[in-house]
Image (cartoon, rainbow, N blue to C red):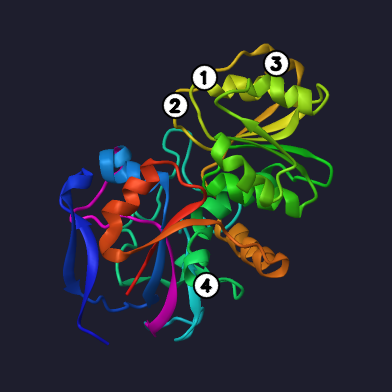
């Protein structure tokens, strides 16, 4: 094994401060594993952390990125969770193993990789063994790297919070990573899926299984959903926009429906009319990914159902700036960095 490796680092907040540096390969401490990173998938959240820090307590030099797939190349003392050669993926919120996430009413926990903890945009990482789960056997590393945040967010919302079932109507907003996982997971559970997105991407959404599509630029979202469903509405809404757009989700939701507030493209202050929430007995879930147990269940579902994550483009490690530019453009699916 080489003594040095490539790792993206920044000494202050801002994409212009990203540098690909040569640094020593870390060594696994007690309870840790050394993982050769094969692929890292990018989230819009990663881009926000690089650009504005998102108010997180970043330690510099800071390495961004949270979602990776790779293989164990060395284990520290007292590690019995993995062996050398095991394929693994990271957990986005490594301290959250099951149940309710940690924190309290004043300070909810947001201890994630590539934020509170160092990130994974490096050729090797040494982290606690408990921070990884076994990778799905049916996916390559690039595909597997898309599960820890995007895949888990959709899975946790629909199966752990909303308990989607056959015949339910699911509205998926957009065609990014979480949205397309939501489409595939909803179809896996026998739901009818409506996808709202840009006209040029809707045919691909239908090819993935969408039952109905809505052109978000030319159609009124609420009226389109109510027309498609005969005024019934949507039982589940993957809400990716935030801001006042939550009010649109409330208007089109079915009686007893579930809204999963996931995105914040229009800001972190949300608004909605109150009466539909009261009269339709709606539940609004705040979804901040999910716990390790849910990720392990997602991995099993991926292998059993042969779910194939959608990758928009793959880039090499040195091409991170171009990958971020593509993320700005609104990809169809995930952007992945592959390691040499």
| Magenta-colored span | 55-75
The residue that disc 2 covers is 266
Q: Point out the image quarter for the C terminus.
A: bottom left
Q: Nearer the viewer, mark 1 or mark 4?
A: 4
Q: Point out the image quarter for the N terminus.
A: bottom left
Q: Earlier in the sequence, mark 1 or mark 3?
A: 1
- Answer with the quarter of the image where residue 196 lies: top right
Q: Earlier in the sequence, mark 4 or mark 3?
A: 4
Q: Position of residue 53 (x, y in %)?
A: 28, 41
Callout 1 touching callout 4 (CB < 8 Å): no
Residue 319 among magenta residues:
no
CA distance for labels 2 and 4: 34 Å
Q: Please determine whether, in this image, residue 215 is positioned above or below residue 56.
A: above
CA distance for labels 1 and 2: 8 Å
The numbered mark at residue 140 is 4
Q: Nearer the viewer, mark 2 or mark 4?
A: 4
CA distance for labels 4 and 3: 44 Å
Q: Residues within 10 Å of mark 2 (few under 14, many from 20)?
A: few
Q: Residues within 10 Å of mark 1 (few under 14, many from 20)?
A: some
The residue that disc 3 covers is 276
Which of the pair 114/249 is nearer the observer?
249
- Answer with the quarter of the image where residue 109 lies: top left
CA distance for labels 2 and 3: 22 Å
Callout 1 touching callout 2 (CB < 8 Å): yes
CA distance for labels 1 and 4: 39 Å
Asked which secondary structure carries label 1, the reply is loop
Q: Please determine whether, in this image, residue 273 is positioned above or below residue 324.
A: above
Q: Examine the rendering and report whether any part of residue 302 can be seen.
A: yes
Q: Residues within 10 Å of mark 4 (few under 14, many from 20)?
A: some
Q: Examine the rendering and report whether any part of residue 116 can be seen.
A: no
Q: Earlier in the sequence, mark 2 or mark 3?
A: 2
Asked which secondary structure carries label 4, the reply is loop
């Amino acid at each position: 094994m080489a003594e040095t490796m490539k790792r993206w680092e920044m000494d202050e907040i801002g994409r212009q401060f990203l540098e690909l540096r040569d640094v020593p390969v870390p060594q696994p401490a007690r309870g840790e594993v050394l993982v050769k990173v094969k692929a890292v998938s990018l989230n819009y959240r990663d881009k926000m952390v690089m650009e504005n820090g998102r108010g997180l307590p970043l330690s510099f030099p800071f390495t961004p990125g949270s979602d990776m797939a790779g293989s164990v190349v060395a284990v520290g003392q007292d590690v019995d969770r993995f062996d050398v050669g095991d394929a693994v993926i990271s957990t986005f919120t490594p301290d959250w193993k099951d149940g309710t996430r940690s924190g309290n009413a004043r300070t909810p926990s947001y201890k994630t990789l590539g934020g509170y903890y160092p990130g994974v945009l490096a050729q090797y990482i040494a982290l606690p063994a408990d921070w990884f789960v076994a990778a799905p056997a049916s996916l390559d590393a690039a595909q597997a790297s898309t599960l820890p945040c995007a895949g888990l967010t959709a899975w946790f919302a629909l199966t752990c919070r909303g308990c989607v079932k056959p015949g339910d109507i699911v509205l998926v907003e957009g065609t990014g990573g979480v949205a397309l996982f939501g489409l595939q997971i909803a179809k896996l559970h026998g739901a009818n899926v409506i996808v709202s997105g840009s006209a040029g991407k809707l045919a691909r959404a239908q090819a993935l299984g969408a039952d109905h599509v809505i052109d978000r630029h030319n159609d009124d979202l609420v009226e389109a959903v109510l027309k498609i469903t005969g005024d019934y509405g949507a039982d589940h809404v993957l809400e990716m926009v935030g801001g006042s757009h939550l009010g649109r989700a409330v208007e089109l939701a079915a009686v007893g429906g579930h809204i999963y507030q996931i995105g914040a493209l229009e800001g972190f202050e949300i608004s909605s009319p109150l009466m539909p929430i009261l009269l339709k007995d709606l539940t609004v879930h705040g979804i901040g990914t999910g716990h390790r147990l849910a990720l392990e269940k997602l991995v099993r579902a991926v292998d059993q159902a042969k779910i194939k994550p959608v990758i928009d483009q793959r880039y090499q490690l040195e091409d991170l700036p171009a990958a971020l530019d593509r993320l700005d453009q609104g990809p169809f699916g995930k952007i992945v960095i592959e390691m040499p």
